[in-house]
Amino acid sequence: MTTSIELAQVIDGYWAKRFGCDRQDFVHAGTLVIHEKELAETGKVYLYHIDKMSIVRIAPSLAKQARLPDGYNREFGALDVNTFQVVVPASVESTLLDYYLDPKDFECFTAGVPFTTRQMDAENDRAGLLPLLEACTEADLDAAEVSLEEPDPVIFGVFEGAQLVAYAGHRYWDEAIADIGVLIHPSYRGRGLGKAVVSALCEWSMRNDLVPMYRVYSSHIHSHRIPESLGFKEWVVIETLKVAQEERTG
């Protein structure tokens, strides 16, 4: 099971590898600016806040307009949205929060009678998975990133009798982080079954030395309840900004 110290090493190590920086950079209030020409036509800027550090993915022309130093600059400090908006008018389209679970903070939860919880197999349990997927909307499936064509490698389900009523699966990030997706039958929501099935998946993940991760939009207040009630802590904030057309074509 991952310890608290190892947790920080795994999380910061993943993001350091992702952005080609040093893991120790995250403990300093610096900013890493990454130029991406592909963003020029989108008008989008991505701002990551990881520990004390900020990372900006931005088109080169907008970086120049915003007077952002190229590469990593510790003297610049950690960039925030308000500072960026002073120089380049932009609106925040969305804010994603990445929650991670430290084993010492874990609060186990079970569904109780009349429900049972067990690990599932995407192939052998396909007949049971189909009714749940069919009962949910496309938006539900997209949010949970659930697909029988590309099944999650590890899946847990909560059942009432033979009926699957709650699903939690994870995708591997570098074989170290378990990115969790949850799907609840519309008729069974609000009964704690999402919390129960995620709890079971977290137990499995931590026994197998994986760090559970739960990603939610900041605006989806109800979605925060599951990770927060199980002991997850917010670790990474990802903001998507949209720059006005006139600002990015000048």
Image (cartoon, helix red, strand yellow):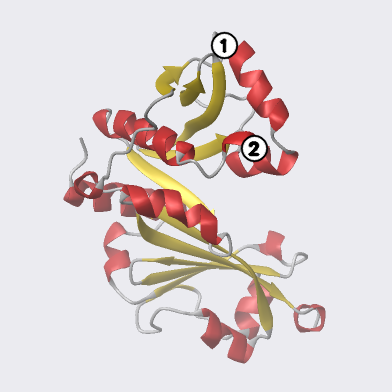
Side (left or right) of 77 relative to 218: left
When the figure is inspected, residue 209 is found, relative to residue 31, above or below; the finding is above
Q: Nearer the viewer, mark 2 or mark 1?
A: 2
Q: Quadrant of residue 21?
A: bottom left
- The residue pinned by badge 1 equals 123
Q: Crowdedness of circle 1 by 10 Å Cα count: few (<14), some, many (20+)?
A: few
Residue 167, label in figure:
none
Question: Which secondary structure, mark 2?
Answer: helix
The residue lying toward the viewer, choosing from 138 and 31, is 138
When the figure is inspected, residue 66 is found, relative to residue 110, above or below; the finding is below
Residue extending farthest top: 124
When the figure is inspected, residue 4 is found, relative to residue 189, above or below; the finding is below
The residue lying toward the viewer, choosing from 108 and 70, is 108
Question: Which secondary structure, mark 1?
Answer: loop
Q: Kindly tell me whether residue 224 is visible in this rendering.
A: yes
Disc tally is 2
Residue at 43% of width from left, 23% of height from top? 114
Q: Position of residue 197 (x, y in %)?
A: 43, 33
Q: Give, as a three-letter code, the residue at label 2.
A: Pro
Q: Position of residue 148 (x, y in %)?
A: 64, 22
- The residue pinned by badge 2 equals 186
Side (left or right) of 116 relative to 166: left
